[in-house]
Image (cartoon, helix red, strand yellow):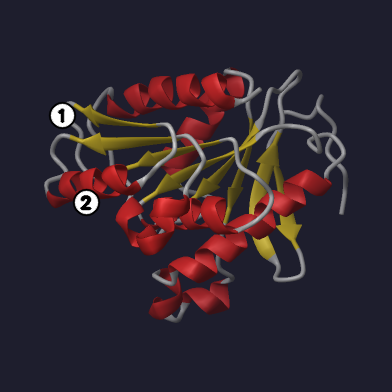
């Protein structure tokens, strides 16, 4: 696998073996950490919203890895899309890949999870190596982490839209179960996908501040 140096900022298409997960990797100069995106059901590395967030985070000095947690063949089985344990193991595989790159070997790693990806991020952080410095959930389903929530030691920020109905309650339940440093923020006027004007910009501000606070 080609090693990516810190001067490389143009996103590069890569493949993470042995499974063959497709991903987009970019690290700006003087990066302070790497944020790995865990997409929700029906989404992937080409998600317009997550790519928008990733671009802004790179502007703020973070490297980003946007990854498809399933292969195209695996996506055909809808059960895989909601298999939080499987998605968490793939996320951990991605973090291990990042750790193997000499340009990022010593950098803090964070997870940015959306929808089911948030549940996978919390399970991976609680269960697997390597250690993760911070987690941000956008419109996520952290409740899907289930019993693993009580083992989460990673500082966690839950961002939920004020128009996201039942998901607010599910986030509150998960928030109460997490023992780590945590915060839950309601983004006014945002729905589940944060498509409303200005709401994704608010997500970026909160996420960047959270990663900055815990990437040491």
Q: Are marks 1 and 2 in contact (CB under 8 Å)?
A: no
Along the line of sight, which residue is nearer the eye, 172 or 121?
A: 172
Tell me which residue sits at (23%, 49%) in the image: 173
Q: Quadrant of the C terminus?
A: top right
**CA–CA distance in space, label 1 to label 2:** 18 Å
Question: To which residue does mark 2 refer?
Answer: 170
* Residue 27, picture quadrant: top right
Along the line of sight, which residue is nearer the eye, 11 or 162?
A: 162
Q: Quadrant of the N terminus?
A: bottom right
The mark found on residue 49 in the picture is: none
Q: Secondary structure at mark 2?
A: helix
| Residue 211: % across, % down | 53, 26
Question: To which residue does mark 1 refer?
Answer: 189
Task: For residue 49, say whether it is visible.
Answer: yes
| Residue 168: % across, % down | 18, 44
Give the side of residue 156 with respect to residue 159, left or right: right
Count of labels shown?
Answer: 2
* Residue 132, picture quadrant: top right
| Residue 63: % across, % down | 66, 31
Tell me which residue sits at (29%, 49%) in the image: 174
Tell me which residue sits at (83%, 38%) in the image: 4
Tell me which residue sits at (41%, 19%) in the image: 205
Along the line of sight, which residue is nearer the eye, 159 or 39?
A: 159
């Amino acid at each position: 696998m080609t090693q990516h140096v810190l001067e490389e900022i143009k996103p590069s298409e890569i493949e993470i073996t042995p499974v063959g997960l497709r991903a987009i990797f970019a690290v700006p100069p003087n990066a302070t950490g790497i944020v790995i995106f865990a997409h929700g059901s029906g989404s992937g590395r080409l998600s317009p919203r997550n790519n928008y967030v990733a671009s802004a985070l790179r502007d703020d000095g973070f490297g980003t890895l946007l990854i498809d947690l399933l292969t195209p063949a695996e996506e055909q089985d809808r059960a895989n899309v909601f298999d939080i344990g499987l998605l968490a193991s793939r996320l951990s595989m991605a973090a291990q890949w990042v750790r193997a790159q000499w340009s990022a070997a010593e950098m803090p790693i964070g997870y940015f999870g959306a929808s089911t990806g948030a549940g996978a991020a919390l399970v991976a952080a609680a269960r697997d190596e390597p250690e993760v410095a911070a987690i941000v959930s956008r419109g996520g389903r952290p409740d899907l982490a289930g019993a693993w929530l009580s083992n989460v030691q990673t500082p966690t920020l839950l961002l939920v839209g004020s128009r996201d109905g039942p998901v607010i309650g599910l986030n509150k339940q998960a928030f109460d179960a997490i023992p780590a440093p945590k915060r839950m923020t309601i983004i006014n006027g945002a729905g589940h996908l944060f498509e409303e004007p200005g709401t994704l910009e608010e997500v970026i501000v909160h996420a960047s501040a959270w990663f900055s606070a815990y990437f040491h």
